[in-house]
Image (cartoon, coloured by chain):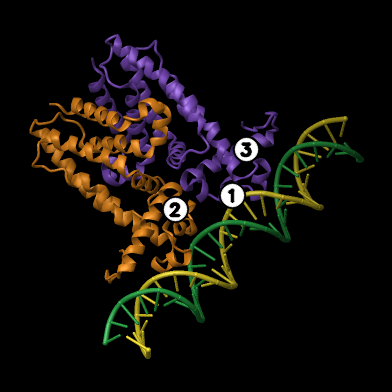
Chain colours: A orange, B purple, C yellow, D green
Amino acid sequence: MAKADVSPRRTRIQREKRQAIFEAALDVFSEKGLRGATLDQIASAAGLSKQNIVYYFNGKEAIYSQLLESLLEEWVSPLRDLSAEGEPMDEILTYVSRKMEMSRKMPRESRLFATEILHGAPRLGEMLTDDLKTLVDEKAAVIANWMVEGRLATIDPHHLIFSIWAMTQHYADFDLQVQAVLGPVRSDTRFEDAEAFIKHMLVRALLP
Amino acid sequence: MAKADVSPRRTRIQREKRQAIFEAALDVFSEKGLRGATLDQIASAAGLSKQNIVYYFNGKEAIYSQLLESLLEEWVSPLRDLSAEGEPMDEILTYVSRKMEMSRKMPRESRLFATEILHGAPRLGEMLTDDLKTLVDEKAAVIANWMVEGRLATIDPHHLIFSIWAMTQHYADFDLQVQAVLGPVRSDTRFEDAEAFIKHMLVRALLP
DNA sequence: GGTGTTTCTGCACGATCGGTCAGAAAAAGA
DNA sequence: TCTTTTTCTGACCGATCGTGCAGAAACACC
């Protein structure tokens, strides 16, 4: 589907500049959205001229699409790493830890995906119904199996995964609201507190 | 602050047209965002001309701001109705029910607020740090008191509220992803299943 | 140093969008 | 009915934005 570069052969300058553009685009797109962002803003943030941006990417949409695509694999890696071989509760709590770490360290990526899905995800489309669904179904089956074995309490594995997504990503996507409500005093430990809270809830819900 | 109409005196036509514009704007803004939406799209959706839209509102931003403001009170009403006089578990589960009902019946409003906060909420600002913080602090205190009285297990009330926001709104804001993952088969009961799941988790977490 | 390729810029076009304004049309009030 | 106010429209403007293109500048290779 992706008409991606048939020749991934890139010069040093191409690699550097493309990376700089990606970094700048992540900044601008995550803050303003696809339509709110302008090529000038991205160019300025990348320290390049607008025309030079167009030289490396065929237009604004191309940057956006390729940026999304380049981030997708890392974005779902925590779930992919959830292993059927591990200790059930450990695996799930590790998953929560990694998701919270991403909310802390990659809020721009979280907001980028959130905005995309929120607005219809025209650029993800099959990625959701195919790849993501397959991955989630597979991991849900692993969790369901743990429940059958009596190693976890029985709850719906799909909604369990949804609830982990929701709670962890909430602290990235809605960080502004969280900070506004918590105030400056309690806000300095909000990520640690949130992680402890989520894990506490999940342990209570999942202990056999 | 709001230079809102000093005279709320409105003719019948004004009321009807303003309402039609609000309805159309909610459609367009929730789908495309503030910058992605155009006056022509709103006008077309409202069955009016672009100039007529400008006649009733002073520009696009004004529609957006007044729309947000007009929805805010209803949006937080479920939390406002959480009563210290009620039975603790009932009150919290009723709150979840009402939030899920809003995700089901008011997804446009949910996405509108989500996008606004996600992108910095320049139009809410003090509304969050003042009104919302006050409301949440007040209700968190109510819940904390229930815990002191031994009527609920002790967990952090603020993060409890955040987790309810996150889980319930997830099914509105990320409905596309939820549907993609669940598939058409399981998706028809997704709201009922989600509500049951969330309540189950909260009961487990909150039972003394 | 010469040559071909890659990288970058100046210029400018066309499209879109938000907003203005005079005046027409419709409604309300007398 | 006549007048006043409200409502609506057509024409248009300035600004912004994405994009194309010719050619300059920088670079790589021999």
Q: x, y percentage for residue B82?
A: 41, 18
Q: Which chain carries label 1?
A: B
Q: What type is the residue that disc 2 sits on?
A: Leu
Which label belongs to residue B39? 1
- Real-space Cα separation, disc 1 to disc 3, in angstroms: 14 Å
Badge nearest the viewer, 2 or 3? 2
| Mark 1 nearby-residue class (10 Å; few <14, some 14–19, many ≥20) | some
Q: Mark 2 lies on which chain?
A: A
Q: What type is the residue that disc 3 sits on?
A: Arg
Q: Which chain carries label 3?
A: B
Q: Mark 2 points at which residue?
A: A34
Under circle 2, the secondary element is: helix
Confirm whether circles 2 and 1 share one chain: no
In the image: residue D4, left or right of residue A146: right
Q: What type is the residue that disc 1 sits on?
A: Leu
Which label belongs to residue B18? 3
Badge nearest the viewer, 1 or 3? 1
Confirm whether circles 2 and 3 share one chain: no
Q: Which residue corresponds to the image point at 14% horizontal and 35% vertical from the top-left?
A: A90
Residue situated furthest top in the rendering:
B149
Name the residue nearer the viewer: B140 or B42. B140
Q: Earlier in the sequence, mark 1 or mark 3?
A: 3
Q: x, y percentage for residue A74?
A: 25, 50
Q: Which residue corresponds to the image point at 39% horizontal and 10% vertical from the top-left?
A: B85
Tell me if I can see residue B129 in this picture.
yes
Q: Which residue corresponds to the image point at 49% horizontal and 27% vertical from the top-left?
A: B74
Badge nearest the viewer, 2 or 1? 2
| Mark 2 nearby-residue class (10 Å; few <14, some 14–19, many ≥20) | many
